[in-house]
Amino acid sequence: MTPESLARTVARERRPEPASATDASRFVNAWVEIESLADERVRAFVLILRTRGCYWADFKGCSMCGYARDTLGRSATPAELAEQVSRALARYHDEPYVKVYTSGSFLDDREVDPTSREVVVRAFAGRARRLLFETLPEFATEAALVPLRAAFSGELEVALGLESTDPVVLSRFVHKNAPPSAYFDAAATVRRLGLRAKAYLLLKPPYLTESESVADVVRSVIEAAPRFDALSVNPVHIQGGTVVEWLFRRGRYRPPWLWSVVETLRASADRRGSARLISFPTAGGLPRGPHNCGSCDGRVLAAIEEASLDQRFEVLDGLDCSCRDAWAAACRLEPLGVEA
Ligand code: SF4
């Protein structure tokens, strides 16, 4: 089975059946996490809306992305989206940073219609200082962004899943549907309109070794830094219904080491220019997430978070553990096809 046919098979199997009106009135999840605004630590309210999800995930999808499982299998109506927002506001306590995700693109009309987008943004206007949403680059147009800018009094931040600035990595290993230049163009549009542009960079897509993936992200930070206001290094965690999970279950994929996150941040921090460089690993320390040996994971994760919040990367310099040698051996031996 080729990687491409595997991706399409996995995509078909994870696609949900059309959901009931009851399910469509409930958002997927909401929580509060620590973030930073400028140099200030703040609480951030994260909301996942339930929508039809990413159109690309229906067709093929990215090799690490299983968010399609949180979607409706059909478009949500404006009334259903309004009900989700209303329920979310009951959990919102004026956190200054708000992040709204949709398991896809907030700016895709099939997921969130233009009127509902304004409803979402206005719900937090005057209460949040910054509001983030994520989109694929083809939807980040002036026509979609200008009404939202008018509807929100604070800063809007547009997140783009660039993942890698290498076109081969992006298309063959991550399985994105657009080249890096499309993400650069979208970021330019976003910034020309006075909004913030944020890029997600993926650490260790399948088919790259540990050391190749570190090098790929370091180079991506250097190339993307002039074009974005923030760069978030996202180490892969194993999501259900993905190519990565298919490989993981067969012993052909290990999530990245936390040492690789440390190494990536240390190697690229001085090359980030004025962009914020951050990493908040999902499922850190867990078997299906980025992890080390188990005994040092909490300490290393705390240091990564400190460095990200304060933009002071010296905190990563003194970290050590006996498992660091195993990571170094894995980086040396993996290209030879040898299990370290
Ligand atoms: S990572 Fe983004 S573009 Fe890729 S399938 Fe998931 S939601 Fe779609």
Image (cartoon, rainbow, N blue to C red):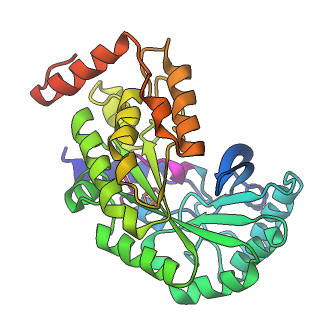
Residue range of the region highlighted in magenta in the rendering: 59-69
The magenta stretch spans residue 240: no
Image point (38%, 67%), residue name: 226
Q: Which one is in front, 21 or 46?
A: 46
Q: Which one is in front, 1 or 47?
A: 47
The magenta stretch spans residue 64: yes
Q: Quadrant of the C terminus?
A: top left
Image point (27%, 41%), residue name: 213
Q: Is residue 67 above or below residue 283?
A: below
Predominant SS of the magenta segment: loop
Q: Please say whether residue 289 is visible from this viewpoint.
A: no
Q: Please say whether residue 232 is visible from this viewpoint.
A: yes
Residue 132: give x, y in percent of width and height.
Answer: 63, 64
Residue 240: give x, y in percent of width and height.
Answer: 48, 39
Image point (50%, 84%), residue name: 192
Residue closest to the far left: 336
